[in-house]
Image (cartoon, rainbow, N blue to C red):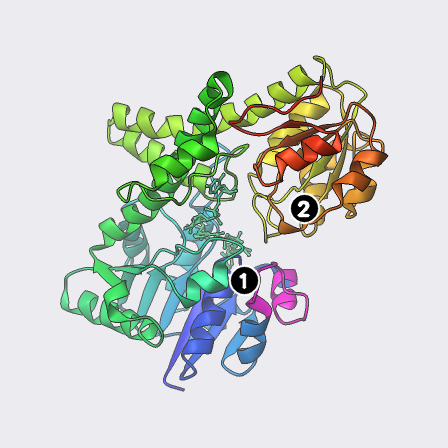
Amino acid sequence: MSKTILCIGAGYVGGPTMAMIARKCPGYRVHVVDIDADRIRAWQSDQLPIYEPGLHEVVKSCLNRNLFFSTDIARGIEEADIIFVSVNTPTKTFGQGAGMAADLQYWEKTARQIKQHSRSDKIVVEKSTLPVRTAEAMERILHSGERTVHFEVLSNPEFLAEGTAIKDLENPDRVLIGGHSTDSGRRAVAELVSIYAHWISRERILTTNVWSSELSKLAANAFLAQRISSINSLSALCERTEADVTEVARAIGMDSRIGPKFLNASVGFGGSCFKKDILNLVYLCRHYGLTEVADYWEQVVRMNEYQEDRFVRQMIASMFNTVAGKRIAVFGFAFKADTGDTRESPAIRVCRSLIEERASLVVTDPEALDNARRDLADCAGKVTFDKDPYRAAEGAHAIAVMTDWSEYKKLDFQKIYDSMSKPAFLFDGRNCLDHQRLFQTGFNVYPIGRKPLSHL
Ligand code: NAD
Ligand code: UGA
């Protein structure tokens, strides 16, 4: 074994990223630690703590060979040459910057732990998404007091998307590494480049200064979310004008300067990062007195909330202005297909609004029901959960599609329609079903950004 890599944080990013490095770099010993003992146990078992296509095979291929999971953080730090920090950086919920700024308590705690347990020089890699200039604060903590050990801090943000994590890690558009232009900074960057170069071509490994790297991660998420908010804003106009948002997206996406991706109109974007990273960007801009820049990006989040609320308003208006006492089957709770993750899922806001309107909900999802139960734990008596979509739809007045699971396209909608209360409504928050066919089956169909197909 040449060198030891440690990753602090065994979550959605730390687990899959380290498993990929271990698989591609058999000469390195990769150790992943976490404070959450249950999570660590799950990584060592056949029931991994996250659902991600292809992940199981990658973990299995190197677990206990050169990939190890444990809760022994102190020992992990002592033995490591390179330390990735991949802890959570959620939005602050208290004090200054509440609801906007990044909560850096977990990250700062790891910086202090690294300092406490280090006996030899280390490269410390920011894998978590962090505000610009966080590396500076990390360096200050690491080099405070007695300076017997040298720490070189790099930024190496992660761009994987959930549901496609393994594909993204195996074949990323680019890997970004930010470092200082000092001798030790350049050496550290070269060392990290050489790890990724085991399977990624050098042209796709981009090196920049630390601050550009930190900001590029926030910028990439802001640009992606902005495209969704842009097309969603137009979906509202399409519904008023009989333009079809899918046709508009296709027409503009064929312009090579615009490109076709991330133009699917929807009930809104979810996921743990888009909202938090944009709000973090907004907070930073305000901190630097850039009010107009902050307002510009904040609107991307506001448009997303508008889209979620608009979806509920549409449901209520088309169901004769009341959903009180009506059974509504919510198809999908995950924030996107192929993941069990429900963080910031639009389904949460939509379900809560419908419950406020006194609807009775039944939520179905192939992978996310445990998380859905936790997210709606305070709504007991108003919502039930059923893995079987056929049972969920039985007796329902409406179906609300919240996640574009491919399974839903293969369902027998005639059977579902027959079991529902009439008139039967279907609100497709992902534009993922065959609307014409559903309409012919008897459903009143309400897509996003397209004319409804109604028998009423
Ligand atoms: P996560 O919540 O799934 O995992 C973070 C883990 O860190 C948790 O298991 C937690 O117990 C652990 N942790 C917290 N403090 C610790 C400490 N002091 N010592 C040891 N372990 C500690 O989070 P995630 O989704 O993996 O995200 C991690 C970072 O990566 C965030 O900054 C996020 O913005 C960024 N990111 C996430 C994704 C994604 O798809 N989820 C993609 C790109 C970047
Ligand atoms: C996103 C980015 O795509 C990753 O590059 C990034 O690393 C990650 O955030 C992160 O920093 O956490 P992720 O949130 O996993 O990844 O999933 P996306 O595929 O980006 O989807 C986000 C949300 O947007 C989902 O709710 C999805 O349904 C929605 N979406 C996506 C749309 O509504 N329309 C689209 O055209 C595309």
Q: Name the mark on residue 34.
A: 1
- Mark 1 / mark 2, whichever is N-terminal: 1
**Mark 1 lies within 8 Å of ligand 1 (Cβ measured):** yes
Classify residue 116 as left or right of residue 93. left
Q: Give the range drawn in magenta.
A: 38-56
**What is the x, y in percent for residue 309?**
56, 23
Give the crowd class for mark 2: few <14, some 14-19, many >=20 residues within 10 Å: some
Q: Distance between the residues labelled 1 and 2?
A: 36 Å
The three-letter amino acid code for the residue at tag 2 is Tyr
Instruction: Examine the structure image and report whether residue 372 is included in the region drawn in magenta.
Output: no
User: Split into 4 quadrants, where in the image is the N terminus?
Assistant: bottom left
Residue furthest bottom in the image: 1
For residue 249, say whether it is visible: yes
**Relative to residue 39, is residue 27 depicted above or below?**
below
State the image quarter where residue 447 is shown: top right
Instruction: Examine the structure image and report whether residue 46 is included in the region drawn in magenta.
Output: yes
Residue on which disc 2 sits: 408
Q: Name the mark on residue 13.
A: none
